[in-house]
Amino acid sequence: MPKSATDVMNEVILAAVTDAIESLKAASKGMPNSLLRDINAIHPNVAYADLPAELRNAITASVRGAFNRLLKEGYTVSEGSAAPARPLAHPRPQTEQRRSPRSGARRPPRTRGPGKR
């Protein structure tokens, strides 16, 4: 049974985070203060170039691995262009047009069933 895209992406992201943590540990060369400094330098506005080289390499490898994994699982990975447009459905042949209720014709008054006010 093929895995869902969500399951595949969960596994890919878990592997990417694990690889990133391992690369940060390798970049600190066993120095806890360096590891904390590198971790504290990561924030929502950090630029890719500001990351340690080991972490940039791990991210690049994780991205390649994610695309390869998706392809291996049978998912299609397209280029940056938009998905191909679906062909439009054939228009239905027009039959006689309906007249709107406000076209001058009055509806007959509604009759209410027994026991309704």
Image (cartoon, rainbow, N blue to C red):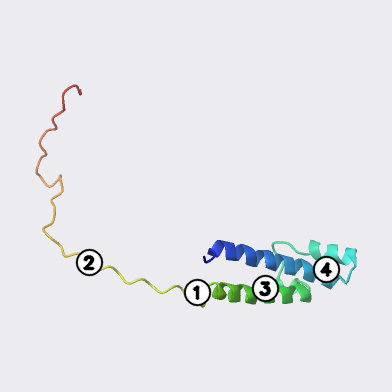
* Residue drawn at the location 74% of the way across and 68% of the way down: 20
Tell me residue 43's x, y (percent): 73, 62
Mark 3 → mark 2, Cα distance in angstroms:
47 Å
Q: Secondary structure at mark 3?
A: helix
Q: Which mark is residue 91?
A: 2
For mark 3, what is the residue? Answer: 62
Mark 4 → mark 2, Cα distance in angstroms:
62 Å
Q: Secondary structure at mark 1?
A: loop
Q: Which mark is residue 76?
A: 1
Q: Secondary structure at mark 2?
A: loop
Tell me residue 103's x, y (percent): 12, 47
Q: Amino acid at mark 3?
A: Ser
Q: Amino acid at mark 2?
A: Pro
Rate crowding at label 3 as few (under 14), some (14 to 19) or many (20 or more) other CA atoms within 10 Å: some
Which is nearer the eye, 84 or 107? 84
* Residue drawn at the location 90% of the way across and 67% of the way down: 31
Tell me residue 74's x, y (percent): 51, 73
Mark 2 → mark 1, Cα distance in angstroms:
31 Å
Query: Residue 86 appears in which quarter of the rendering?
Result: bottom left
Rate crowding at label 2 as few (under 14), some (14 to 19) or many (20 or more) other CA atoms within 10 Å: few
Q: Amino acid at mark 1?
A: Thr
Residue with the most extreme front position = 1
Q: Which mark is residue 25?
A: 4
Mark 1 → mark 3, Cα distance in angstroms:
18 Å
Q: Earlier in the sequence, mark 1 or mark 4?
A: 4
Q: Quadrant of the C terminus?
A: top left
